[in-house]
Image (cartoon, rainbow, N blue to C red):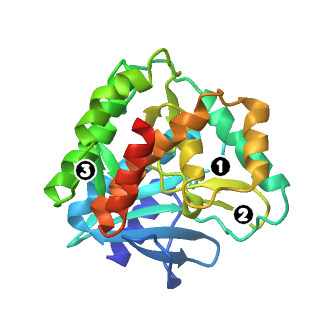
């Protein structure tokens, strides 16, 4: 497999690459991660089962779209494919480990806002060209012109359907779906390219002090979904939000919508891990319905 990967890197980059040093590094919750080095270059590789190659293809597409906005830094995708029973993706190596002080996080906020402002030449509404994954859960991205409809059907509704199959019990789930148009009445956000899974584990600062985001579940949606998720598991530094609001201030209704948007991730965590996420989801639904 490693010979195939090094040959693929060489083919794509046009520079001969041979793996002189390979060692295991963190690859997230569901992948094996490796540092691949020659004398002059280093890459990051993630490995999974061959059946998961579509997940890597979608990740590469999301990173490439973010890269092309020329706003916030992401690891550039190099190549991906399968070999035997394994799927792989190779990315630019970024040396993470910075992050002291407010300036890099403030810059991350500004750069993310710039990415959210990016509008491609042809935009079909909310969604994406292909489905991708949020964790290991399929994320449905069918193009939809109405944001409330997209969120009800392809985000909350889909996660509730999966949760019921898993044995989850959500007494107010159907009522919530019925009132989503009311909850988002009069709110017409601009479709923004969003990271889609922006918690602290998918953001960092390089040793040179440059902010980076990675492991996206990208699509075109309301920019607030990214900001909401940064608050779900403890929050980013205050300087991040200060920088974001300098470039594109959040609407006053965000404080109410963020709980609604984060319900998607709580339901997904129930579908991935079970346990106490069911009660957290029900508490959140009850809070939204008032």
Judged from the image, the secondary structure of the residue bearing numbered disc 3 is loop
Residue at the (42%, 57%) spot, across then down: 79
Secondary structure, mark 1, is loop
Residue at 71 percent across and 71 percent down: it is 97
Q: Is residue 243 above or below residue 11?
A: above
Residue under numbered circle 2: 206
Q: Residues within 10 Å of mark 3 (few under 14, many from 20)?
A: some
Q: Nearer the viewer, mark 1 or mark 3?
A: 3
Whichever of callouts 1 and 2 sits on the residue coming sooner in the sequence is 1
User: Does residue 77 appear left or right of residue 100 in this picture?
Assistant: left
Q: For this rendering, which residue is in front, 271 or 195?
A: 271
Q: Position of residue 58 (x, y in %)?
A: 36, 48
Instruction: Give the label on residue 170, or none.
Output: 3
Which mark is first along the chain, 3 or 1? 1
Please name the residue shown 50% across and 47% down the image. 63
Dot 2: element: loop
- In terms of image quadrants, where is residue 127? top left
């Amino acid at each position: 497999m490693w010979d195939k990967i090094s040959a693929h890197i060489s083919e794509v980059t046009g520079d001969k690459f041979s793996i002189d040093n390979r060692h295991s590094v963190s690859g997230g919750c569901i992948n094996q991660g490796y540092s691949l080095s020659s004398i002059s270059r280093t890459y990051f590789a993630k490995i999974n089962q061959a059946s998961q190659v579509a997940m890597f293809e979608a990740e590469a597409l999301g990173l490439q779209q973010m890269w092309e906005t020329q706003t916030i830094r992401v690891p550039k995708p190099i190549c991906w494919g399968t070999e035997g029973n394994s799927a792989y993706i190779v990315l630019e190596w970024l040396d993470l480990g910075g992050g002291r002080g407010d300036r890099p996080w403030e810059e991350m906020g500004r750069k993310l806002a710039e990415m959210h402002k990016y509008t491609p030449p042809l935009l079909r509404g909310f969604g994406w060209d292909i489905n991708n994954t949020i964790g290991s859960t399929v994320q449905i991205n069918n193009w939809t012109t109405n944001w409330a409809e997209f969120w009800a059907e392809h985000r909350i509704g889909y996660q509730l359907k999966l949760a019921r199959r898993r044995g989850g019990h959500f007494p107010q789930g159907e009522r919530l779906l019925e009132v989503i148009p009311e909850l988002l009445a009069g709110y017409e956000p601009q479709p923004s390219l969003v990271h889609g899974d922006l918690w602290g584990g998918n953001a960092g600062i390089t040793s040179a002090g440059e902010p980076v985001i990675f492991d996206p579940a990208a699509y075109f949606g309301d920019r607030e979904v990214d900001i909401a998720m940064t608050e779900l598991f403890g929050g980013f530094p205050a300087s991040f939000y200060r920088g974001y609001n300098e470039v594109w201030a959040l609407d006053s209704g965000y404080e109410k919508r963020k709980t609604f948007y984060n319900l998607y991730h709580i339901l997904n965590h129930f579908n991935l891990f079970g346990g106490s996420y069911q009660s957290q989801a029900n508490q959140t639904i009850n809070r939204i319905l008032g």
